[in-house]
Image (tube, rainbow, N blue to C red):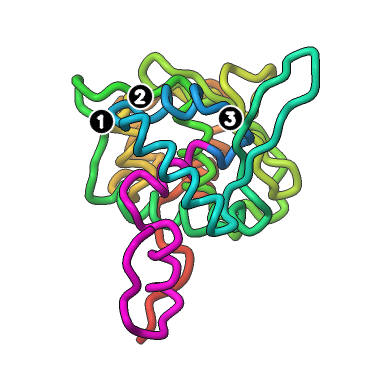
Amino acid sequence: MAKRFDQYCPVAHALCLVGERWAFLIVRELLHGPKRYTDLADGLPGIATNILAARLRELEGAGVVHKRKLPPPAPATVYELTEYGAELDEVFYALARWGARSLGPPGPEDELYPEWGINAFAALFSPEAARGLTETYVLRIDADVFSVHLENGCLHTSVGAAEDPDVDVEVDMSTFFRLTGGELSASEALEQGAASIRGDRAAFERCFQVLSMAPRTPAAV
């Protein structure tokens, strides 16, 4: 467990709970449901097995993670976030948006896991921009295909192409970063040939208002 900071501060306390190396990435792996120990190890290349075991014990002790046994016919022990731990999604997605702005798009040597878009779209999702919207976007980003469905402003994502989307978008990863980062507008992407679409152009423009790295609250003056 991280050392205490000799001060009364909620941020310092939070870092004591999830601030050790790998701890928050374990939370990332569990945000979309329970996983076995081997699943966690596979999703965290580079982590030593003793470190993974230690972090899981620490997160259990902090009330962030708990483990349970699945019933037959597939008995196995899985780890999952507690109700308290699941509340970290807001923190995780805000941190992901903030980090992505200086990280930039992945390079040729960077390997993404097949479902990377599920976390990415949840992090980029702006409830304010999506308010009241019900529509579907298919996003083809390099070789990966995802669907983003809004139902009365609520986000649902999946791997693969949904049928009859409002707009089907094809971009490369660099363009995706520029669109979500606000460096490139939807109109500019089309005019420059950086994006191609099938379907409603207005839906394409809304898509990158709903999916954005922009801060969710204005900075204090």
Give the CA separation, mark 1 to mark 2.
8 Å
Q: Nearer the viewer, residue 29 or 131?
A: 29
Residues at marks 3 and 2 touching, judged by CB atoms closer than 8 Å: no
**Any mark on residue 174, and which?**
none
Q: Nearer the viewer, residue 7 or 144?
A: 7
Residues at marks 1 and 2 touching, judged by CB atoms closer than 8 Å: yes
User: What's the residue at 47%, 29% (across, down)?
Assistant: 40
Q: Say which of marks 1 and 2 sits in front.
A: 2
In the image, what residue type sits under mark 2? Leu
Q: Give residue 96's position: percent from left, percent from top.
A: 39, 49
Q: Nearer the viewer, residue 6 or 88?
A: 6
Q: Say which of marks 3 and 2 sits in front.
A: 3
Q: Give residue 35's position: percent from left, percent from top.
A: 58, 30
Q: Give residue 168's position: percent from left, percent from top.
A: 54, 23
Residue 197 seen:
no
Which stretch appears magenta? 1-29
| SS category of the residue bearing label 2 | loop
Lower sequence index among marks 3 and 2 = 3
How crowded pointer 1 is (Cα within 10 Å; few <14, some 14-19, many 20+) is rated as: few
